[in-house]
Amino acid sequence: MNKVKILFVGKHDRINEGKSMVASTSTLVRGDKNIIVDTGSFMDRDRLVDSLKKENLTPEDIDCVIITHTHLDHSANAGLFKNAEILVKHNLSNPGIKFYVNSYFIEKVNLDGYTVMKGVKTLLTPGHTVDNISVAVETREGTIVVAGDAISSEKYLDLSRIPESCWDKNEYNKSRKKILKIADWIIPGHGDLVKIK
């Protein structure tokens, strides 16, 4: 059965007007493959490698990296994983891309319900950005959705709240409802595990 482990919790901290410190939550999914969902920002590189060591893993042991969207606080360390395929959706018209880090090859894939491994699939969850995806993981504890910034923090479980940084508010609300319909637990893009049902 799949296991989910938060490697580190990312946060947004406003330092002053116009300047913030940002980092995403990075999550390890273990099953038939070792998967990382979101790799954090530049300042998270050592923290990411150290967190993997605590799980008896190295970057070379990771089979797949899923980037929930292409903001640097979620994707900056993707290149650490030399043996991984990287799944990302990077614009409205493209259904998705699989990059092979150890080669020059890319492959188009449809990330709408794409099965990464048994019990793990991607979901299109636009709103925060045009390219946001989330990851649904079946576990013994129920379905855990690693939401990225489709639900960036626990406060956005409240459907009346809309974040300042939002590409499309209607799509954002549709994506949140889609996630809440299937999730027993949610890992927000910048927060810790939250029980839903």
Image: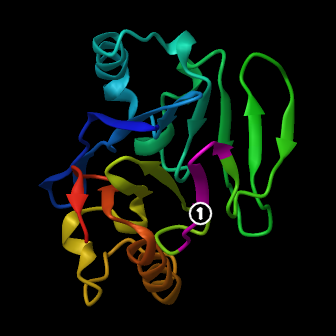
> Is residue 118 part of the magenta span, yes or no?
yes
Q: Is residue 40 visible?
A: no
Q: Would you identify the image quadrant in which residue 43 lies?
A: top left
Residue in front for this viewpoint, 131 or 111: 111
Point out residue 118 in the picture as x, y percentages from the top left corner: 62, 43
| 89 is higher (above) or lower (below) than 179 | above
**Whole-percent x, y for residue 136 in the image:** 50, 56
Residue drawn 70% across and 57% down?
A: 111
Q: Nearest the camera: 123 or 181?
A: 181
Closer to the camera in the image, 53 or 181 = 181
The answer to which quarter of the image holds residue 142 is bottom left
**What amino acid type is highlighted by mark number 1?**
Leu
Q: How many marks?
A: 1
Q: Residue at x 53, y 67 (%)?
A: 129
Q: Residue at 41% x, 77% y: name it.
A: 176
Q: Position of residue 23 (x, y in %)?
A: 30, 42
- Please give the residue where the numbered disc 1 appears in the rendered image: 123
What secondary structure prevails in the magenta region?
Answer: strand
Q: Which residues are magenta?
A: 116-126
